[in-house]
Amino acid sequence: MSTYDRIADLRLRIQEYTLEGLEREVSSDFARRSTVIHLRGNGEEGVGEDVTYDSVDQEAALRAGASLPLQGSWTMRSFAEHLATLDLFAQEPQEEVSRLYRAWAYESAALDLALRQAGESLHAVLGREPQPLKFVVSLRLGDPPSLEKLTSRLDRYPSLRFKLDPTSDWDDELVIGVAETGAVRLLDFKGHYEDSIMEQPPDPDLYRRVVDAVDGAEDVWFEDPKLTPEIDELLEPYRSRITWDANIHSAADIEALPFTPQMVNFKPSRIGGLERLLDTYDYVEAKGIGAYGGGMYELGPGRGQIQYLASLFHADAPNDTSPEGFLLADLPEGLPDGPLDPAPAATGFRWRD
């Protein structure tokens, strides 16, 4: 039985739904907006989070309100099939990938509702036990970049480990300073974010300086390099440490990579639907490929849901699924800086209910 088959026949009834907008300033110096989907039926509520990045798309969704024909009785499979026939955007999205983000929001809310209506937890239905969850904190070092953004967090939380985005304005002093902290587990070159504000154009000098600085640190991964001929030659000795993220939407995308990776980044919202997500988990397990979880600056229940999945499928990896407080511009006190104890809700698809 596939992992998806374990949830596909769960039944749910939707009587109504509402949308709730969220907004906060986050550590990468922008105002993050997201929308929580609340599906209700039979006295229960299921929640999911739309992590579409563009504010104009978030605003349009809130203006349109709960206008989709979702009411009725479904299985998880038939609900997903129905959802695929609907245009989830009142106007064309700013980025095509946003369609996947929104589909994930509705499917994850439906799964939460179906499990709650059945009185079941996700881990019980999947036959997996949540494990203590290792995590890293995703951080950009500012404009202009400063090591202080990293060291100030380490001063308060010495056990933290990080995922950083090197950029061409990292000078030699900063690159060496980052390496000397010993606190970095992922370096994300953002090589597959074309036409995005997060795009980092291929810069062989940057790659060379960064790779040289962490050459002896076998626990540092290189994410999403842009493999131009020059960069491919530079990174060829490090292929066992190259991992992928932005170009992964399904198992087929992993199959199409230029070489078989040791590890890939799973962003459930970027994969888009539960069947594709769980089939991709099955694929990497069968192929012996490692995985770690990826975050999207979730502000609501979506954060707990990706932590839940990571605890079930790859708890011991450098998961970009830190507690939400580490993503905020003003870092709170009292956050956990070590593995997170498992905290699934008694029923549903929720973490720390």
Image (spheres, helix red, strand yellow):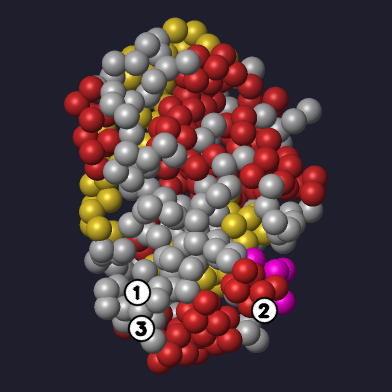
In the depicted structure, whether residue 171 falls above or below residue 131:
below
Residue at left 72%, top 69%? Answer: 240
Find the magenta span and give its range: 237-242
Q: Secondary structure at mark 2?
A: loop
Q: Is residue 298 left or right of residue 26?
A: right
* The magenta stretch spans residue 41: no
Q: Earlier in the sequence, mark 3 or mark 2?
A: 3
Residue at left 23%, top 30%? Answer: 60
Q: Nearer the viewer, residue 184 or 309?
A: 184
Q: Is residue 301 visible?
A: no
Q: Main secondary structure of the magenta part?
A: helix
Quadrant housing the C terminus: top left
How much space separates mark 1 and mark 2, taking CA atoms?
A: 23 Å
Q: Quadrant of residue 68?
A: top left
Q: Amino acid at mark 2?
A: Glu
The circle on residue 218 is 2
Quickly name the residue at label 3: 147
Give yes or no for contact between labels 3 and 1 (Cβ–Cβ under 8 Å). Answer: yes
Residue at left 32%, top 78%? Answer: 145
Quickly name the residue at label 1: 141
Q: Secondary structure at mark 1?
A: loop
How much space separates mark 3 and mark 1, taking CA atoms?
A: 7 Å
Mark 1 burial class by Cα count in 10 Å: few <14, some 14-19, many 20+:
many
